[in-house]
Image: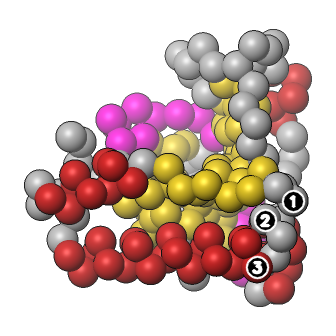
Amino acid sequence: MHPPKIQTFDVQAGVNVDNKGFRREVREFRRAPFGLYMSREIVGRASTSWIESWLLPELGIVVSDWTWRTGHERDQDFYLDIARVEPGEDLWRTTDLYLDVIVKTGAWTEVLDVDEFVEAVATGLLDTGTAEWAMHRCTEVVAALAGHGHDLDAWLASRGITLTWRGHGTAQAG
């Protein structure tokens, strides 16, 4: 069992440092009143070539759109990590709290990695306060998505948030 995954996003340096300490060059950071957008290549992964993410501190989520390589496509539109998102002027930090939500627009929403979440709590990797916060965030996100017809954009629009995606990864697919 691994501890919570912590990543940093250094806007000034243009890098994303993952939980293993690998520095990944970011093609684009973009700030908005509600969060931070990041777009970068995925290195060393056979299934995907690009990731675009929005870090949304108020909602406690990171919303990602992956560019899948041919033969590895997934039947999903968005991947949401339940996370503590700590904004900063130049340095943002996320702590992934194990629970993930995938969305197929207009069709369904599914929670993933509940087993990891339960094990993290049982082994003390997540304290009860953080675990409770994560569980509340997850249930609120799922309820909001269901209440908006499993439409992430509709839910976020009801909160005054519009996410824009550049689609940098489309040229890297294949």
SS under mark 3? helix
SS under mark 2? loop
The residue drawn where x is 85% and y is 79% is 157
- Which of the marked residues, 1 or 3, is nearer the chain's N terminus? 1
The amino acid sitting under disc 2 is His
The reply to whether callout 1 and callout 3 are in contact (CB within 8 Å) is no
On the question of residue 103 being in view, the answer is yes
The residue drawn where x is 74% and y is 56% is 108
The reply to whether callout 1 and callout 2 are in contact (CB within 8 Å) is yes
> Which residue has dot 2 on it?
150
User: Measured from the top left, where is residue 41 in percent x and y?
Assistant: 67, 29
Residue 20, magenta (yes or no): yes
Q: Quadrant of residue 31?
A: bottom right
Q: Would residue 98 be found to the left or right of residue 85 on screen?
A: left
The amino acid sitting under disc 3 is Gly
Q: Against 103, is 158 above or below?
A: below
Q: Against 16, is 55 above or below?
A: below
The residue most toward the left is 123
Which mark identifies residue 147? 3
User: Measured from the top left, where is residue 43 in percent x and y?
Assistant: 57, 21
Looking at the rendering, the stretch of residues picked out in magenta corresponds to 18-33
The residue closer to the viewer here, 14 or 35, is: 35
The residue closer to the viewer here, 45 or 11, is: 45
> Which residue has dot 1 on it?
106
The residue drawn where x is 80% and y is 21% is 172
Q: Compute the Cα span from label 2 to label 3.
A: 7 Å
User: Measured from the top left, where is residue 135 in percent x and y?
Assistant: 40, 73
The residue drawn where x is 86% and y is 40% is 167
Look at the image and tell me in which quarter the N terminus lies.
Answer: top left
